[in-house]
Amino acid sequence: MNKHIEIKVCTGTGGIAAGGLEVLERFQTCIEQAGLKAKTLTGCLTHRVGCRGLCARDVLVDVIIDDQKFTYQYIKPDMVERIVEEHIINGNPVSEWLVTEDYLSFYNKQQKVVLAMCGEIDPEDIESYISHQGYRAIEKVIKGMSPEEVIDEIKRSGLRGRGGAGFPTGLKWEMARNAPGDEKYIICNADEGDPGAFMDRAVIEGNPHAVIEGMLIGGYAIGAKRGYVYIRAEYPLAVERLKKAIEQARHKGYLGERIFGTDFGFDIKIKLGAGAFVCGEETALIASIEGKRGMPRAKPPFPVQKGLFGKPTVINNVETLANIPSIIIKGADWFASFGTEKSKGTKIFALTGKVKNTGLIEVPLGITLREIIYEIGGGIEGDRRLKAVQTGGPSGGCIPASMIDIPVDYESLARAGSIMGSGGMIILDETDCMVNVAKYFLQFTQSESCGKCVPCRIGTKRLLEILERITSGRGKEEDLKKLEKLSNDIKASSLCGLGQTAPNPVLSTLQYFRDEYEAHIFEKRCPAGVCRDLLTYTILEEFCKGCGMCLKVCPSGAIIGEKKKPHKIIPEVCIKCGACFEVCKFKAIKRG
Amino acid sequence: MIKVKIDGKEYRVKPGITILQVARENDIYIPTLCDDPRLEPYGGCRLCIVQIKGMPRPVTACTTPVTDGMEITTTNEYIEGLRKTIVELILSDHPNDCMVCEKAGDCSLQELAYFYGIRTNPYYGERRRYTTKDNNPFIERDMEKCILCGKCVRVCSEVQGVGAIEIAYRGFTAKVTPPFEKDLNCEFCGQCVSICPTGALMGKSSLGKGRQKDVKKIETVCPYCGCGCNMTLHVLRNEVIRVSSRPDNFHEGWLCVKGRFGFEFINSPDRLKRPLIRVKPRDKNSKELPVPDLNDFREASWDEALDLIANKLREIKDKYGPDAIAGLSSARCTNEENYIFQKFFRAVIGTNNIDHCARY
Amino acid sequence: MAGLATVFGSGAMTNSIPEIENNDLLFVIGSNTKENHPIIALRMIQAVRKGAKLIIADPRRVPLVRFAHLWLQHKPGTDVALLNSIAHVIVKEGLIKKEFIETHTEGFNEEFLKNLEEYTPEAGERITGVPKEKIIEAARLYAKAERAGIYYTMGITQHSHGTDNVFAIANLALLTGNLGKESAGVNPLRGQNNVQGSTDMGCSPNTYPGYQKVTIPAIKKKFEDLWGVRLPEKEGLTASEMLFEAEAGRLKAMYIMGENPVLSDPDTGHTVKALKELEFLVVQDIFLSETAAIADVVLPATCFAEKDGTFTNTERRVQRIRKAVAPPGEAKDDIWIINEISRRLGYNMNYAHPEEIWNEIGMAWPAVAGITYSRLERGGIQWPCPTIDHPGTPYLFKGGFPRGKGAFTVIKYKPSCEEPDLDYPFILTTGRMLFQYHTGTMTRRVKAIEALYHEPYVEINPEDALDLGIRNGDTVKVSSRRGSIVLKAMVTKRPERGVVFIPFHFREAAANMLTNSKALDPLCKIPELKVTTVNIEKFKED
């Protein structure tokens, strides 16, 4: 008889989308039917757990029998029965469904601090968190540390803001603590808005109590009695889990009056953001919580001096706060043992783009981009050539392939013309057009500009229009200069971080990939074959077998030819959709 | 008092005030489109950017408080270059129809274009176009001319306490609008019109009546309620075409709907133009509200009317004594008129039967 | 006015408009400031933004309530009960300013205190309908404030006991020492551009310019010397009395300059009848008003933009108005007209320019002797300003009261003249709205205003409307003991149950057809325009 059976099913947003809830339910039914509960000493437990990173392989399922863990990938509900029967009952894991070698290499170079419990604990059950030393940190703080000692510990740990700017967290807390006033606030910024980034969502979905505990400690340190979590409404699962977590924490007495029987009281309110990217900017976020239109204001005064409702306010990112409990429990020195001299700890990235393994990763700061791409990411899809790494989302820049041996830390990335940002990391290969990449980000920032200041509202629009002209073959020589000047002027004169960093994608691609711009402007050619207006499709007679597939899919009737004879594309009719290119089995369509 | 250095010159200033305030007090020119001393600092137009020694990037003078020892540069090639770009960007999304614009000659944007000598604009592209019109009867809202300085939004909420408009949408499409893009429906104080730096907001009753040329501006006091607001009548060819109010008066230049837009009566065709003498006898039996009808009267010369009045008053005074005559004066007339009216009753008629309407 | 003059020795706003911003408490009673004094309301909003507390006492939910910390919705006509119970709490809780009372006031005696006894918060609640907790809170807020300002208008004065209301207000200020300093005082807001000026100028039956009593021989002598004639001895008739005298046939002629009493005075039927009784009626105006319509001679006058002179605003600020345009047709300014009639009656008035008159006013009234036209070029000056180098007086009573000591007054609550009964179950209160002004002679000739706000209406509480089967926009007939009018119903929570409101701007449904001209304040002769009992029914065409 087995002593202990545990089954953990990924039910993050990715897991649920892949059918995680159905898989979980099927496990429960199968276990019930097999009467497994009676056959084990401590029961047969099924857990929903948060994201463990490799969402591309969802649904991921751990089957743990007496401390022996097997992980399955790509699990669908109808596969469950076999796993239960063969593995759990008969003790023979279903080997063809188990994760493969490269799954393990995905984790080898990672260092899980913030995400350590994601994928391990049940995010909807506070007991699960408590059993992993949950709320021990706040207890330690309240019972045995002065606010100054807490701040000192955080300062010594070297933790810096994970929202992107990298401001030292301990210092921020100290400034708020020292700011005059008896009413102060701590806000958790969960308005994650970079396209393709989902670090904060995963943390809240996978381990919401860590964020709550981080806020409690922060509140204690700065002298706040109330905290807000500003979270985007487009994260319904995270919102719900956070709500549940707050309720459970209140019920347990970790939130509310007289926590641990002391005078310290603290509570948290959730404020939903309405999907404005700019509300991730702290002053806009404050305005939004206050019920105003989410528009930034000039700093100084900084929020630590005059923030929410005019009171000293600390705004920390989700990941920053989720780091706090571990630092308190394990100590600043432990935390500082990860990372580089100026960038301590770990950082979560949403690794996307042209790598084989996409997903959520947590790495020690100082790791090289090469390690991330080739070891964790498993290299480029189709083994094509790496062109660049985009970090920092719309505010960041593109680091060329030649520089991928630089370490990932705040300073190095900045030196390379990009930023750490909140954790977006997009891998670009030879099939990506860098002008188009810049255009994509400008489209985003332009439509997300709040409209308050002129350089951002109109300047980014004009930048975007120049890029549109270039990618459609109407670029002029002077446009390069204009892009540079306008970009620099926008950076210098915009009101908030959004505008000040919006030109970064343009400037960094101009710096490293000027030749691509020039090809678009002078040769009217897109080297990566992306910009539709610059493409021409022709049929290579020597390869064309006259199968007629291209003719069939062409939506504009631009292809003519007789069966079994080479076909032709009429350029005037061709709308450059690329359907023929995709469908041709003989590589007879030339794009260029 | 703290010391700051502006463009190399030292100033002793109150702590806590902004760089722009110091500049204004000392007549140092810093351009701005979104600042008004009567409103909270905004920092939106970015024109007032200045450089401060030791700071990595330029800051806006309107939002940055001075600190002791601060060294500020308000103008140099770099700053002016940034400012010029900003004006160029605004103009790249502006109708630039100054030839026919109501605001020409009184437009802050026009002045800046002039100041920076912008003849050709390196930036061009899409311009905002709005086809629907706001049909409210008071305020012409031409949002294509709006530069999103936010003054109207702020004055409406901070000063007027109404909040009838707000910026909606994002990015290039950001737009000042009443809720749900409906027609403006508010107190129509026109504070927004008075503070708009461009021709985006204008009083409808003034449209096409005259811009700046040959307009005489006469300082006077509002004829409506007891607040006594100061107003400037804009007069062209013997017609009041517009009313404004100076921000430096005791009520900071704010007016209400009546003061700002209620001047049309001056030129009403209903105005009495000649003395009238009754021809149709009064119907003494009717207690109904009388209906004003010019046909009840005939026009008369001043001499005839005045003689008639004098004779009648003398006759009644002689017959019944002065106390059979009474005068009602007006809270709408001037002090001087009220003074001589009561003097007329006391000294000329010989009665204290004089009162006014302050009770109603 | 007369009320304040009795207790302080001067009756005008004690403070000035810019000072409002620095009040730390504003008590606005009987004033729909946001609509009737829009620019003063802006200062109040600024004060609130700066942290001041705002208390509003008004039977209607006036727009300023949105900014208020405390709204006391008392029944119309119960102001004395409300104010006395606030005073009761202030005394009971020991919140009075003893030192101020000892040095600056008189009448804080047994009788005064004994009278307050009965106005407990409970009694206050019973009479006014305001919960006693709110009365207590208002008392504490007001008494504990450093710089509390009271602001009131016709909601206080247009009652048969209007002077009592003012006395009760003054008592509050005296109890708490909120007088004689910046941003603290008692401020009647004057409703028309130059009400202050016309009273200052002696257009009153009992005072010469500068509130100098006609009955004091020395003063009469002074004016006789100044004007070079013998002057009448006894006080004259007040406006309301004139109409009664006219109706009775004792008053034979009236000369009305720039007024429209037919619409603005209570009981239109009575006004019309009285004026028609006159042998001779002269009206001088800029339009053919409803009053001019029954005149024997109508004289075309000039409007504000067509003449020079001065207005004095509600905060005693004398300001220049200037001629901007020529008058239409043969219209003449009032000064020329009076000059001409005087000359015809054998008294030479040859004022060539208003400045000459102003200089004479300075001789007649020392408080404005220091104000000259040339000084006014640099902006308005607030009287008192006795000498040419005096800066003017933003707030009054800095060193004490003109009458020596501020006087407490024993005031008892008296019900209004008309109280709701079965025939007339509703209380009608009248007033202005933001967009129209007074009898509408000016504003109703502004196209934009007329486009939106041309229709008379009566505000009815939704519950009352439900009882009466009236829906928003229905045509209703409102009747009083004096007459009836037909107009649209506006169903709104602005008035409480049992109270309706009609703006008096509209001749189409003249609110004053309903009001009562016989209920007058005994001291000021102000009619009770704020409390008239009426009946409302759905209008059926016959």
Image (cartoon, rainbow, N blue to C red):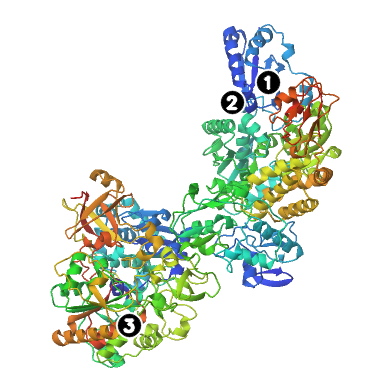
* Position of C212 relative to C454 (above/below): below
Q: Callout 3, which amino acid?
A: Tyr
Looking at the figure, which quarter contains the C terminus of chain A?
Answer: top right
The reply to whether residue A414 is visible in this rendering is no
Which is in the foreground here, disc 1 or disc 2?
A: 1
Q: Label 1 belongs to which residue?
A: A60
Looking at the figure, which quarter contains the N terminus of chain A?
Answer: top right
The secondary structure type at the circle numbered 2 is helix
Counting residues from the N terminus, which is met first, the one under dot 1 or under dot 2? 1
* Position of C61 relative to B280 (above/below): above
Estimate the spatial distance between the alpha carbons at disc 1 and disc 3, rounded to whole Å.
95 Å
Percent x, y for residue C65? Answer: 39, 55
Estimate the spatial distance between the alpha carbons at disc 2 and disc 3, rounded to whole Å.
88 Å
Q: Label 3 belongs to which residue?
A: B339
Q: Callout 2, which amino acid?
A: Glu
The local crowd at label 3, few if under 14, some if 14 to 19, many if 20 or more residues have their Cα within 10 Å, is many
The secondary structure type at the circle numbered 3 is helix
- Protein chain holding label 2: A
Which is in the foreground here, disc 2 or disc 3?
A: 3
Q: Callout 1, which amino acid?
A: Leu
Label ID, residue A127: 2
The residue drawn where x is 32% and y is 82% is B339
Percent x, y for residue A417? Answer: 79, 46
Which residue is farthest front?
A562
Q: Is residue A106 left or right of residue C64?
A: right
Estimate the spatial distance between the alpha carbons at disc 1 and disc 2, rounded to whole Å.
23 Å
